[in-house]
Image (spheres, rainbow, N blue to C red):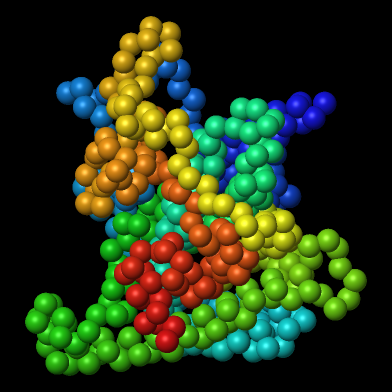
């Protein structure tokens, strides 16, 4: 009986690969109470994950010249040059047309968002006032929001891919990995964090582009925002010397940019203070009787979810949206602190899957299962610090596996477990970062250096 329980549990864990590495929203991220059965069928039919047989792979992946298109986290949202004008038009249309509609008359009051927390209500009211006075700020906020979510998703997905591809084929191995690594707890924590990011990204894309079909909102929304040329976050931190010598801006223009930087820094400060206080509620236990795992953040998000749903039912758009309390997000905020308690302080770090290290060293190519014919791509490969593909593990800085994805090969990096996943405090920081407190992610080697620099500059 125990062996069957193990087999079922292991299959459930590995089954998460399709969901976690998919660009479409999972059903867990979509509040099924908010959509009709027809919409649910559309979600299931619209998944971007496709099943390929070995026989199809050879034809599907090869270009006419015999080469393969390679996709990775750096270029997955890029569009062909001819399509960039369309992306610019869609992105630009949103940025310009949506600004006058911020905080319409039917927008909920701050006390409606935070009925039980006067301090948070006051902070949110201050943010509302600031954004209403300078609506262009929201354009920069949504770009920072999606930039951070995209980098978070990439980082977490690399970890989850490593966990999923780690070979656990016997009950003894399962027990050993649980004892040495707290494997199951870490797996579930990362999966819940991905669910939060997925839900935030999906809901955010739907809020920005309400006309997009639900089945393509997550990927298309990210693509549009990635190719939006209306806003460049580096303008928030560019210095006077660069503006003068690098961009050849005259003195009045440089002064206007510096004034705008100062104004946005003040508003970003208000935003970060609000979300720092808001997400910190995950550490506060309710004073009244509570369910298992309940904390003050769960209670606030549950109340907020009821408010958002009531407005949706009345067909009243909440523009802009700052909070996205989906069922999956609330569940994650409830469960993650409980999982943290079960990770021993002596837990070891999980390394690359051995079988893929071996495949990279040996240069093993994928093969057609039916004919045993060699397919035109390797199973796995290493990259050095310069990003060059190598076959020696000695100088390897990263390990990648090649995954079929439509008419291309997706180079999925397998990330060794980072140290933050062994620290209860750091796990909470990452959770808070997924929910909007981006300052909590500083120093955890999750965000790109330039993104961290912008957040530091805007929050200091």
For the N terminus, the quadrant is top right
Viewer can see residue 419: yes
> Viewed as shown, does residue 201 lie left or right of 60?
right
139 or 1, which lies in front?
Answer: 1
> Viewed as shown, does residue 57 lie left or right of 193?
left
For the C terminus, the quadrant is bottom left
User: Please, which residue is most extreme toward the right here?
Assistant: 289
> What residue sits 11% from the left and 77% below the top?
246
> Viewed as shown, does residue 254 lie left or right of 271?
left
Q: On screen, 43 above or below 188?
A: above
53 or 1, which lies in front?
Answer: 1
Quadrant of residue 264 within the rendered picture: bottom left
Mark count = 0
Q: Position of residue 324 (x, y in %)?
A: 61, 64
Viewer can see residue 203: no
450 or 222, which lies in front?
Answer: 450
Q: Position of residue 236 (x, y in %)?
A: 32, 79
Q: On screen, 255 above or below 228?
A: below
> What residue sits 48% from the left and 56% below the top?
418
Q: Position of residue 218 (x, y in %)?
A: 49, 50
Quadrant of residue 341 within the rendered picture: bottom right
> What residue sits 27% from the left and 35% below the top?
391
> What residue sits 35% from the left and 90% below the top?
262
Q: Position of residue 132 (x, y in %)?
A: 49, 84
307 or 192, which lies in front?
Answer: 192
User: Please, which residue is most extreme toward the top here?
Assistant: 371
């Amino acid at each position: 009986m125990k062996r069957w329980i193990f087999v079922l549990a292991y299959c459930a864990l590995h089954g998460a690969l399709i969901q976690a590495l998919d660009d479409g929203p999972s059903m867990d991220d979509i509040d099924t109470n908010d959509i009709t059965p027809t919409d649910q069928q559309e979600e299931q039919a619209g998944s971007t994950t496709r099943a390929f047989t070995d026989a199809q792979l050879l034809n599907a992946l090869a270009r006419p010249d015999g080469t393969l298109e390679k996709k990775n986290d750096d270029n997955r949202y890029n569009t062909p040059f001819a399509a960039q004008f369309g992306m610019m038009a869609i992105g630009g249309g949103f940025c310009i047309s949506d600004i006058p509609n911020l905080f319409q008359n039917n927008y909920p009051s701050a006390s409606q968002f935070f009925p039980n927390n006067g301090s948070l209500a006051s902070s949110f009211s201050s943010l509302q006032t600031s954004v209403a006075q300078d609506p262009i700020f929201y354009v920069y906020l949504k770009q920072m929001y999606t930039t951070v979510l995209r980098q978070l998703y990439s980082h977490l997905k690399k970890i989850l891919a490593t966990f999923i591809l780690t070979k656990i084929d016997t009950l003894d191995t399962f027990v050993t990995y649980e004892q040495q690594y707290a494997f199951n707890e870490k797996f579930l924590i990362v999966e819940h964090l991905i669910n939060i990011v997925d839900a935030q990204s999906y809901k955010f894309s739907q809020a920005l582009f309400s006309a997009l079909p639900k089945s393509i909102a997550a990927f298309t929304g990210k693509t549009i925002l990635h190719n939006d040329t209306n806003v460049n976050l580096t303008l928030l931190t560019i210095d006077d010397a660069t503006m003068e010598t690098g961009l050849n801006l005259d003195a009045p223009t440089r002064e206007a940019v510096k004034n705008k930087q100062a104004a946005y820094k003040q508003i970003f400060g208000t935003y970060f203070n609000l979300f720092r206080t808001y997400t910190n509620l995950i550490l506060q236990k309710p004073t009244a009787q509570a369910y298992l795992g309940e904390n003050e953040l769960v209670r606030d998000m549950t109340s907020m979810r009821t408010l958002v749903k009531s407005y949706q039912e009345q067909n009243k758009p909440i523009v802009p949206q700052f909070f996205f309390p989906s069922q999956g997000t609330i569940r994650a905020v409830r469960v993650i602190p409980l999982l943290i308690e079960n990770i021993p302080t002596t837990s070891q770090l999980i390394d690359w899957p051995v079988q893929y290290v071996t495949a990279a060293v040996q240069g093993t190519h994928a093969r057609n299962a039916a004919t045993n014919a060699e397919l035109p791509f390797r199973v796995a490969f290493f990259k050095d610090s310069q990003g060059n593909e190598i076959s020696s593990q000695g100088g390897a800085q990263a390990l990648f596996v090649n995954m079929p994805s439509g008419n291309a090969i997706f180079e999925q990096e397998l990330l060794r477990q980072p140290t933050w996943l062994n620290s209860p405090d750091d796990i909470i920081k990452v959770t808070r970062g997924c929910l909007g407190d981006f300052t909590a992610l500083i120093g955890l080697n999750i965000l790109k250096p330039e993104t961290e620099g912008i957040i530091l500059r805007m929050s200091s």
